Image (tube, helix red, strand yellow):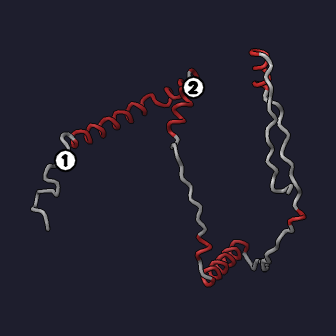
Amino acid sequence: MPFEPGRSGNPAGGPVGSRHRQQLNGEFIAALLRDFRHGGPKAIERVRRTQPAAYLKILALLVPREHKVQHSNPIKDLTDEQLEAMIEYIKTSLEAQAGGPVKVIEGITEPTTVPATALPVLEPPKRKPNRLTMEVDTAIGPQERKPRKRVPSPAST
């Protein structure tokens, strides 16, 4: 169902003034850029020296609030032939950089396991008493304290 020439698929059209807002945004950004080129670096330096808290707040606002990092291992998805081709490519590029043949160490990996008895048994760290609760005793009088229940660690069982 094609549209008639000159008509969009939205019969109500765009929001009123949207084109004007886009033009205004462009002009505003251009004016900011001109002003920044005129005195921006000096103003930034002055704020950094006279108002370090405001300067740091501006820097913090420039940093994205959330940065999602996804770990991927593209080598895991390669076939054996692709890996061998990559190894050959690396060997030839190393030889070209060194100006001659390069010694490459060949080896195989063998999985190993560590016996559970070889691992050290770690005791939980001793905690100092909370100073705030000790100070409360002097303000409202001494209070009876119940000892905390300790959960045995899996390593000690």
Q: Residue furthest bottom?
A: 81
Residue 10 percent coordinates (x, y): 17, 54
Residue 148 percent coordinates (x, y): 79, 38
- State which quadrant residue 103 falls in: bottom right
- Residue type at mark 1: give it: Gly
Q: Which residue: 79% across, 47% down?
A: 151
Say if residue 21 shows up in the picture: yes
Residue 104 percent coordinates (x, y): 77, 77
Sequence-wise, the earlier of marks 2 and 1 is: 1
- Residue type at mark 2: give it: Ala
Say if residue 103 shows up in the picture: no
Q: Which residue is mark 1?
A: 14
> Relative to 58, does residue 84 appear above or below in the rendering?
below
Q: Residues within 10 Å of mark 2 (few under 14, many from 20)?
A: few
Q: Residues within 10 Å of mark 1 (few under 14, many from 20)?
A: few
In the image, taking residue 26 as reference, residue 81 lies left or right, namely right
> Relative to 87, does residue 148 appear above or below in the rendering?
above
In the image, taking residue 125 as reference, residue 6 lies left or right, namely left
Q: Which residue: 50% across, 36% down?
A: 61
Q: Which residue: 85% across, 40% down?
A: 126
Q: Which residue is mark 2?
A: 53
Work out whether residue 19 or residue 73 is closer to the camera in this orientation and state it. 73
Mark linked to residue 27: none
Q: Nearer the viewer, mark 2 or mark 1?
A: 1
For the N terminus, the quadrant is: bottom left
